[in-house]
Image: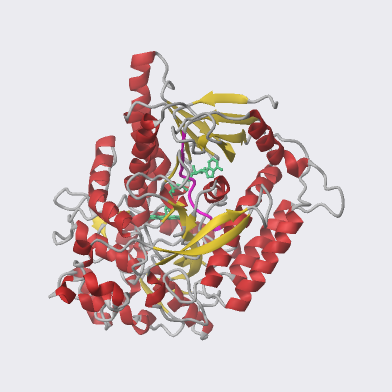
Amino acid sequence: MTEIERHKYDVVVIGAGGAGLRAVIEARERGFSVAVVCKSLFGKAHTVMAEGGCAASMGNANEKDNWQTHFMDTMRGGKFLNNWRMAELHAREAPDRVWELETYGALFDRTPDGKISQRNFGGHTYPRLAHVGDRTGLELIRTMQQKIVSLQQEDFKETGDYEARIKVFAECTITELLKDDGASGATGDGQSCVSGAFGYWRESGRFVLFESPAVVLATGGIGKSFKVTSNSWEYTGDGHALALRAGANLINMEFIQFHPTGMVWPPSVKGILVTEGVRGDGGVLKNSEGKRFMFDYIPPVFKGQYAETEEEADAWLKDNNSSRRTPDLLPRDEVARAINSEVKEGRGSPHGGVYLDIASRLPTEEILRRLPSMHHQFLELADVDITKEPMEVGPTCHYVMGGIEVDPDTGSSTVPGLFAAGECSGGMHGSNRLGGNSLSDLLVFGRRAGLGAASYIESLPARPSIADADVDAAAKFALSPFDPPSQGVGENPYTLHTDLQQNMNDLVGIIRKPDEVEQALVKLDEIRERMKQMTVEGHRQFNPGWHLAVDMRNMLVVSECVAKAALLRTESRGGHTRDDHPAMDSNWRNTLLVCTADRSTGDALVPGVTVVEKEQIPMREELLDLFDIGELEKYYTERELTGHSSRKD
Ligand code: FAD
């Protein structure tokens, strides 16, 4: 039996971004003890990088806004493939979650009459993003951390120990979820269930075990599987892979959001995000001929909803009741594809992007007030002053719509005791997420997952147990990259990672061709084989090569999910564009592709992946009735529309 540091908690939350922290607060408010584990420093998660804002229909900037409009915009953005119940809960609850943040101490920008200010963003009918300049995520994390400290102070008063109910384990990576096989009778019906999580301290390399009947995954996305990405080193798909290996389903993995505006120059910063807030505040996209090309790319499903001339688009910026919105703010998938086409047709900028111009649209002081981080980012990294010259931008892998399949109301996965929230969960955003809908998603579903975990624990007749053999196996798996391969040449994890990223970028990127996706799958198989020879040098202390070797297993398995699902879906929808099937196909709208682990084709560490089709539950009739039948006909099959009120009359 391996000697290991052990901890016992009611709930373990893996991930300290917005979703994780909101789950921690909720589980603790229900009286449970919570460990929050994160592989980076506490406070350094993707949420902190969020710039533009948090979508909630508070109606402060336009009183016509309401949850129904937000719901409809979200469904349109996701091309009606969203889990409609999640989209409903999200739209209904987001305003309360934002107001609640103010009670934790958040300081949002204000309108002249003192309300929370809301800005325009792609796909949102009204100005809807509550924001703090272009540093909204920082405020979200700051206030939730502050709330956690206040809860710890309450616990201190009661118990004399600040960490009696919430303890942070920072720079600690979870590598394995542990399960009870059902023999302990924890769930009362003999089902196997989650019993804890196993990981290592990044600094010392020493192992740590959390015994816990409920685990909430809030580990974020998978962007580091792609070469050009706005995501940082943590986004290696750990939660996705941990859930898959524990027996949960992943859905929608073919849908990857390529944000239209990442930096394209210099090469060292390629992919870093340029917030959509630039376009929300009046910035426009132009090609090398100086043309505002987005007017040429309004797709049939959005015809009539967007301005058709520059004059109308500019009038909308001043008064969004009198005109239609600018096509510069079409949903992200549309804008990314448009930029891709302009560059391909030779109308790109010198470094392979297009131009984003705010300089000629707003006075210098306004740009500096509204977009301070963008100004700083371009000046420092590209020597470009955005108050004087346009930015060069192009698509960058930004967000994964796919993730762990969860029950919308409780965040529970298909594995008892395993919950998920935030970017690592799937369903809410369908085939394409609207900007600003992630921060609100984290708050709404982080809270629900915390509540779901609490209710689950209350329902358990006994605590699940952990078998020593499983702990030993987890330790052995984690250490395997230190064992020199018995034959052949040792493979370096950095080389393998570069090859994986190049493969995904080139062959499963923004436009997908079936023969290229097949090639990608062959290459993934080769990388899988080479990973058996993966070797790291040195010791367990401060060893980033080892950390990457462990993460590589997760990136490989999620990449396989993306590629396999992309090959199966023979249509183009949201974040999945097939060169050979360029149109949306109504017969695919209601079909989810569900990925599960297939042990017969892989091994315990990196299982193979099986993908099967599954139908979604039809939308409740009163929600369906919110949409005009003419709009639904663009997405739905005739058979599905028989429930719409206009067809019953
Ligand atoms: P994260 O905030 O990424 O947190 C993940 C946590 O999991 C981290 O603490 C990490 O250390 C931990 N973790 C991961 N793996 C492990 C492991 N194995 N063991 C232990 N811990 C682990 N969305 C908006 O709505 N509005 C915006 O304006 C916006 N701007 C963005 C700007 C940028 C540059 C980026 C990259 C994203 C932006 N997004 C925005 C998207 C949004 O920020 C993310 O989708 C969201 O923050 C994800 O939150 P999360 O809580 O799911 O994960």
- Res. 188 in view: yes
205 to 87, vertically: above or below: above
**Residue range highlighted in magenta:** 214-223
Q: Position of residue 174 (x, y in %)?
A: 57, 39
442 to 152, vertically: above or below: below
Q: Position of residue 263 (x, y in %)?
A: 50, 65
Displayed quadrant of residue 125: bottom left
Displayed quadrant of residue 289: bottom left
Judge by depth and name the residue closer to the eye, 565 or 131.
565
Image side of residue 422 versus residue 631, left or right = right
423 to 446, vertically: above or below: below
173 to 149, vertically: above or below: below
Judge by depth and name the residue closer to the eye, 257 or 215.
215
- Most extreme residue toward the front is 189
Q: Is residue 288 magenta?
A: no
Q: Position of residue 312 (x, y in %)?
A: 22, 79
Displayed quadrant of residue 3: top right
Quarter of the image where the N terminus is located: top right
Residue at 38% across / 65% down in the picture?
387
Residue at 34% across / 80% down in the picture?
298
Residue at 70% across / 46% down in the picture?
545
- Res. 109 in view: no
Image side of residue 352 versus residue 446, left or right = right
Image side of residue 126 versus residue 536, left or right = left
The type of colouring in the image is secondary structure
Q: Position of residue 284 (x, y in %)?
A: 35, 73
Quarter of the image where the C terminus is located: bottom left
Judge by depth and name the residue closer to the eye, 577 or 138.
577
Disc tally is 0
Judge by depth and name the residue closer to the eye, 181 or 245.
181
Residue at 62% across / 75% down in the picture?
516
